[in-house]
Amino acid sequence: MSPKVRPFFLAALAAVLVAFTGGCSDLPVPTAAAPSAPAATETADATLTSAASLDILARFNQKPQVTIAWAKKWIGPEGGRLAFQGFAVDVPAGAVSKVTMFSIRLPVDPKGSEHVVAEFGPHGSKFSRPVTISFPYRGTTLEGASSPTVVWWNNGAWVDMGGWVTADGARISTITDHFSEYGTTSARGGSMLVSGG
């Protein structure tokens, strides 16, 4: 195989593995950046975290090394779950009327990837019933905070969505009827709008 073709072959193989595993969070954490990652991103959402102020967002205590920065799964009207790198989407029955491609995309740039932030897709879609989205909590700077919350990026500000820490203490979750870019924080005020999202 020629050296020029090898990166594309490896990226395609990685995509197939993620597709067959459903983006399971049980996969080992990758260790290097994939050169052809842009081919796997959603074109409409190519600016993940680039315009967003990341300063208020929680950080990972140990920065993850991400090579595959996305996971996708078809979920229909019966509902289902997509989990990836500690992030998850739980879709209840009746949230969508037809089989829909759900996705979780993480930043791979050095500044973005140290933060607990992800873009959930389909971006901009509204759901008939709220879906639950979850984020890593254990092992982040948010762990033990007095007022942890989930926020979403809306027109230049983070909007407070509220949230709860799961019973096992591993994740923080919230419900939403739409997808966008979301993160976690314990910050209040400043550039963050406080509302129900």
Image (cartoon, helix red, strand yellow):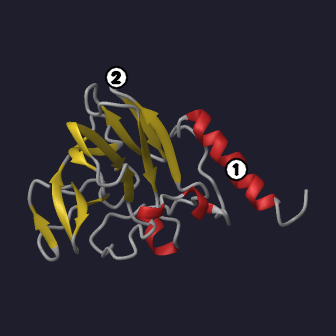
**Residue 40, x across and y down, in percent:** 57, 56
**Residue 21, x across and y down, in percent:** 58, 34
Amino acid at circle 1: Ala
- In the picture as drawn, the residue positioned furthest to the right comes out as 1
Residue at (53% x, 66% y) in the render: 108
Q: How many marks?
A: 2
Q: Name the side, left or right, on which 139 lies relative to 132.
A: right
- In the picture as drawn, the residue positioned furthest to the front comes out as 98
- In the picture as drawn, the residue positioned furthest to the top comes out as 78
Q: Which of the 4 image quarters holds residue 78?
A: top left
Residue closer to the observer: 185 or 44: 44
Which circle's residue, 1 or 2, is located before the other in the chain?
Answer: 1
Q: Name the side, left or right, on which 175 lies relative to 9.
A: left
- Label for residue 12? 1
Q: Name the side, left or right, on which 113 lies relative to 123.
A: right
Amino acid at circle 2: Glu
Residue that numbered label 2 is attached to: 78
Q: Secondary structure at mark 2?
A: loop
Residue at (26% x, 38% y) in the render: 131
Quadrant of the drawing holding the C terminus: bottom left
Residue closer to the observer: 176 or 188: 176
Quadrant of the drawing holding the N terminus: bottom right
**Residue 109, x across and y down, in percent:** 51, 71
Q: Residues within 10 Å of mark 2 (few under 14, many from 20)?
A: some
